[in-house]
Image (tube, rainbow, N blue to C red):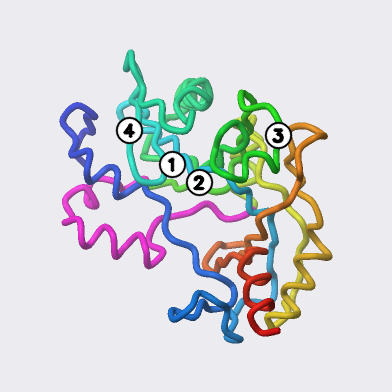
């Protein structure tokens, strides 16, 4: 394995390797109008449901050379030791102290902590969580641990993208994720329920969303509006994952009626 050096690394490759993959909707989206079709994602018997927080996808990348970078979903924004960080959406300002803490106990490999930063002025949903534009929250929702990182750094961009979107990144399974969050002193996105079956129909899933998540569980103040975005569904090994958003089901059922 080659020695990693952030200053010599291809940052385009690092960015692509550590991006979060797209997550499909539980019910398939109709490409013609964006409404939901009745075809649903097939899950194994054990399914974990967590709240989908409506903020901005953020990442802390712990590197083999003892450095770290902080990124948004699409871009790398800041590296350890930089005097200036990209101010986009408050990601660096809010997560730099978290990164400083995490890197102190990082021993080897390339690890990525994915967090949802929310509240503040993060998008139109910020008011659902807080009335204070200076108040932010963050929740850990996934971790990738890429120990054999040297070979992927030789891949072309097209291969990295295909690998990432096909589920090639080695994500932590549920128990490992819980342990990593506890060790890091980070809160996970709220775990809502575990089940062995899910509604197959669009109406059934809409009813489940309404029943199980009537209000967000991550509100930052009592005056916030509190409307949740939806639920993420996953198998414990994370091999199957999908999202169910209120807006998709509300729009679909409205058009049907």
The residue carrying mark 2 is 143
Viewer-nearest of labels 1 and 4?
A: 1
Label 1: state its secondary structure: strand
Disc 4: CA contacts within 10 A as few (<14), some (14-19) or many (>=20): some
Q: Are marks 1 and 2 in contact (CB under 8 Å)?
A: yes
Question: Considering only order in the chain, which callout, 2 or 1, is on the residue closer to the N terminus?
Answer: 1
Q: Residue at x 67, y 37 (%)?
A: 187
Instruction: Give the Cα separation between the discs numbered 3 and 4.
Output: 37 Å
The stretch drawn in magenta includes residue 254 = no
The residue carrying mark 4 is 64
Question: Considering only order in the chain, which callout, 4 or 3, is on the residue closer to the N terminus?
Answer: 4
To which quarter of the image does residue 200 belong? bottom right
The magenta-colored residue range is 147-174
Question: Considering only order in the chain, which callout, 3 or 2, is on the residue closer to the N terminus?
Answer: 3
Query: Is 98 located above or below residue 14 in the figure?
Result: above
The residue carrying mark 3 is 130
The residue carrying mark 1 is 112
Instruction: Give the Cα separation between the discs numbered 2 and 3.
Output: 27 Å
To which quarter of the image does residue 246 belong? bottom right
Q: Nearer the viewer, residue 110 or 166?
A: 166
């Amino acid at each position: 394995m080659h020695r990693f050096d952030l200053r010599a690394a291809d940052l385009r490759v690092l960015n692509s390797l550590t991006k979060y993959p797209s997550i499909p909707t539980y019910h398939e989206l109709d490409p013609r109008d964006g409404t939901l079709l009745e075809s649903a994602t097939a899950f194994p018997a054990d399914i974990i449901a967590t709240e989908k927080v409506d903020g901005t996808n953020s990442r802390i990348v712990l590197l083999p050379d003892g450095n770290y970078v902080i990124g948004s979903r699409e871009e790398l924004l800041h590296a350890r030791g930089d005097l200036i960080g990209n101010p986009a959406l408050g990601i660096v300002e809010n997560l730099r102290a978290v990164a400083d803490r995490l890197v102190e106990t990082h021993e080897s490999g390339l690890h990525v902590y994915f967090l949802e930063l929310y509240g503040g002025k993060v998008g139109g949903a910020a008011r659902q969580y807080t009335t204070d534009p200076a108040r932010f929250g963050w929740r850990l929702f996934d971790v990738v641990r890429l120990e054999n990182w040297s070979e992927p750094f030789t891949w072309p961009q097209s291969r990295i993208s295909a690998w990432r979107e096909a589920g090639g990144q080695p994500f932590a399974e549920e128990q490992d994720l819980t342990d990593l969050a506890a060790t890091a002193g980070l809160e996970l996105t709220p775990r809502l329920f575990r089940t062995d079956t899910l509604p197959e129909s669009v109406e059934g899933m809409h009813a489940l969303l309404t029943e199980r998540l009537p209000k967000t569980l991550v509100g930052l103040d009592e005056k916030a509006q509190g409307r949740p975005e939806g639920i993420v569904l996953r198998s414990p090994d994370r091999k199957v994952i999908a999202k169910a958003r209120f807006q998709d089901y509300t729009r679909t059922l409205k058009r049907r009626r």
